[in-house]
Image (spheres, grey):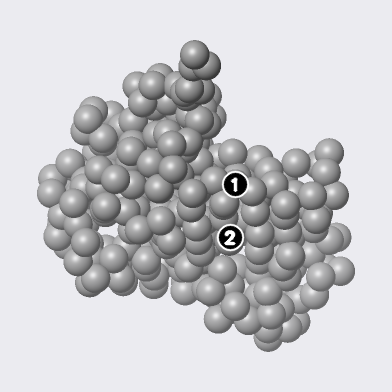
Amino acid sequence: MKKEKTGPSIESAFNYCSKIALEHYENFPVGSWIVPRDKRKYVHAIYAFARIADDFADEKRYREEERLQLLGDWEKKLRSCVYENPENPVFIAIKETIRKFEIPVELLGDLITAFKLDLINKRYKSRKDLLSYCSYSANPVGRIVLYLFGYKDHELHRLSDFICTALQLTNFWQDISIDLEKDRIYLPAEDMEQFGYNEKDLRSHLLNSAFINLLIYEIELTRGLFNEGLPLCNRVGKRLSLELKAVWSGGMKILDKIEYNGYDVFNNRPVINIFDKAKILSQALVMRH
């Protein structure tokens, strides 16, 4: 009798995702020690899913339409894994994560939409357009985390959106030079025009008063979003609250560093070092709102 083909076990699938997550460095470790141990593997599964999709979007060996096809196939696997028995370890772990925490599959689908937008839209005309992109690229992450911790309240999700959008924008301002090498510009065209700065100036890495005033403006608006979302930190349990406060402080620290470096993101990309992390953690432990 022919044996039915089976995929990896759920445990080995989660181990596979954890390996992917722990091999990549970010400003904050994925599923850090602040996240309860029993939830870390689920955080790793979400990260592995998004990381692979991101790799598809950035795969230089393929033409743009081929990368879009890879993302489309990844999305099909996502939507089918909910009611089928996947063989891919990432989707075995994702299926269990969705089932256990009742996470809407649309939130994960939104992340794939963001990667597709990265291939299609490399310029943003207005702030409204940029915030719309963030609603796919960043906000679903915060909502997924809230689901992992059992929070389904709409108001908490709304506050999370503020923080996640602010984090995404902070990453844009931090990586202006890196994104430019990929022919991506996230500074809204209308804002650049308002301050008398253009794409030619940007490509020349022109650090003048127009650029400085433009970044001052963007950073002020980004800080406003961080502050709009801050009440979330004290409306969730202690462990998640500590994690959120650390992430919030880390984002604000990056903005501070951009200012400290004289807004020269072309030559001084701000990063969080070990001393910053120690300070951020100590701030998170005493933060109140």
Q: Nearer the viewer, residue 42 or 246?
A: 42
Give left or right: position of 40 versus 269: left
Q: Which residue is mark 2?
A: 114
* Residue type for callout 2: Ala
Give left or right: position of 90 versus 228: right
Taking the image as drawn, is residue 146 in sight?
yes
Q: Is the residue marked by circle 2 packed among few (<14), some (14-19), or many (20+) residues within 10 Å? A: many
Q: Quadrant of the C terminus?
A: bottom left
Residue at horizontal 13 percent and vertical 49 percent from the top? 237
* Residue type for callout 1: Trp
x, y percentage for residue 72?
Answer: 65, 54
x, y percentage for residue 97?
Answer: 33, 41
x, y percentage for residue 199?
Answer: 81, 70
Residue at horizontal 56 percent and vertical 68 percent from the top? 133
Q: Nearer the viewer, residue 81 or 271?
A: 81
Residue at horizontal 41 percent and vertical 56 percent from the top? 105
Q: Nearer the viewer, residue 241 or 153?
A: 153
Residue 44 lies in quadrant: top left
Residue at horizontal 48 percent and vertical 68 percent from the top? 135
Q: Give the spatial CA distance, label 1 vs label 2.
A: 13 Å
Residues marked 1 and 2 touching at CB (< 8 Å):
no
User: Is 283 placed above or below 112 here?
Assistant: above
Q: Which mark is residue 74?
A: 1
SS for dot 2: helix
User: Is 99 placed above or below 117 here?
Assistant: above
Give left or right: position of 17 versus 215: left
Q: Is the residue marked by circle 1 packed among few (<14), some (14-19), or many (20+) residues within 10 Å? A: some
Residue most toward the front? Answer: 1
